[in-house]
Amino acid sequence: MNLNPGYIWKRGWAVLVLCMLALGSASARAGDFKFEAQLVWATDDEKSPDNKHKPVDEETRKVFENLPLKWKHFFEVKRETSTVSKGGSKKMAMSERCSIEIRHIEGQKFEVTLFGSKDKVCSKQTQTLEKGKSLVVGGNAPNKTAWLVVLKRIE
């Protein structure tokens, strides 16, 4: 074992620098918010015409049961996760004709914008969204169906 004061000093600095780097990256992540977005097709049909669509999971189904929606069946089209930094924004493409932008306002308040074809704004709202909570936005589609985006804050 080397008990040379110079050796101990150099080792101590190395450990201190590594700790500071680790804490710095952790604090950078502490200001981030993680979201999961699901594009869902709502219909009264028991099966989706697209075999790639699968019924939504039980947690998402419960979200829909608590809303005054007229459709009986919900199929997941796409699921994405993304991170929004404090004071920042993030746009997520959910399909060719649907995207969603999440912008952090302050605290736990976010502005959520739903875009349709040609980047036309379909819906925009500002809401407090705590960890574990969901927001549903969407609109009507042909043949008495609808497209919904379920946005859930994960972190």
Image (tube, rainbow, N blue to C red):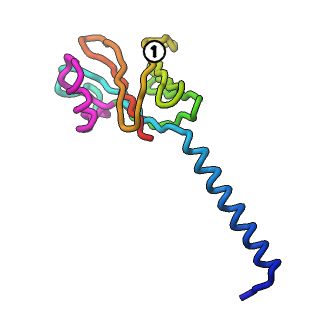
Q: Nearer the viewer, residue 76 or 24?
A: 24
Q: Nearer the viewer, residue 114 or 118?
A: 114
| Residue occupying the point 47% across, 16% down | 115
Query: Residue 52, position in %: x, y?
Result: 32, 34
* Residue at x 26%, y 22% (from the top left corner): 42
Magenta span of residues: 52-76
The amino acid marked with disc number 1 is: Lys
14 relative position to 145: left or right: right
The answer to which of 101 and 6 lies nearer the viewer is: 6
From the viewer's perspective, is 20 left or right of 152?
Answer: right
Characterize the local packing of mark 1: few (<14), some (14-19) or many (20 or more) Cα atoms within 10 angstroms: some
Residue 101 falls inside the magenta stretch: no
Please state, as top left, top right, bottom left or bottom right, where the C terminus lies in the image.
top left
Magenta stretch containing residue 58, yes or no? yes
Vertical comparison of 38 with 118: above or below:
below
Quickly name the residue at label 1. 124
Q: Position of residue 27 (x, y in %)?
A: 60, 47
> Which element is circle 1 on?
strand
Instruction: State left or right for residue 37 relative to residue 73.
Output: right
Res 132 → quadrant: top left
